[in-house]
Image: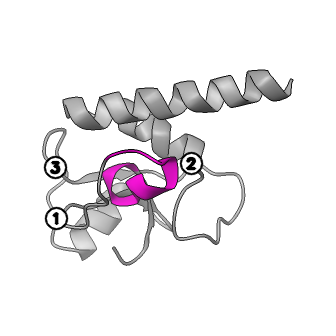
Amino acid sequence: MSGLIRTGRAAADVVDSELIEDHRWVCGYVRSGTVDEYAKSHFMIPKLTGNDVIYDNTLPVDYVDDVMPPAVVAADLAHSTDTRERSAGLRALERMRQAWLAEN
């Protein structure tokens, strides 16, 4: 996934879920440019359905890691149309919420 910051199923291991990281599909935020530019340069067709998900990068800073922070990965999984991914994301978000509540 050259030029992308991994998220969702492609980075599922960072949220300690039962999901196995899946690199067969593209799932990430573009490092530079737009989603349409990325899709065109990688011979992809932008559409609203499918297994490949590319997000515009709206981070206010230049993010240097290859994987989004765990909370973003969990939120992206929770937004998935795949039932297992959505469930894993929701569980991860709830674990993070409980940990934050315990600390605060």
Q: Majority secondary structure of the magenta segment?
A: helix
Residue at 19% from the left image edge and 38% from the top image edge:
48
Spatial CA distance of label 1 from label 2 is 27 Å
Mark sitting earlier along the chain (3/2): 3
Q: Do the residues labelled 3 and 1 touch (CB within 8 Å)?
A: no
Q: Where is residue 56 in the image (x, y as percent from the top left)?
A: 45, 51
Q: Do the residues labelled 3 and 2 touch (CB within 8 Å)?
A: no
Q: Position of residue 102 (x, y in %)?
A: 78, 24
Residue at 50% from the left image edge and 68% from the top image edge:
32
Circle 2 is placed at which residue position? Answer: 70
Q: Which mark is residue 51?
A: 3
Quarter of the image for residue 104 reads: top right
Circle 1 is placed at which residue position? Answer: 44
Which of the two residues, 44 or 1, is positioned nearer the viewer here? 1
- In the displayed structure image, the side of residue 44 where residue 33 appears, left or right: right
Q: Which mark is residue 32?
A: none
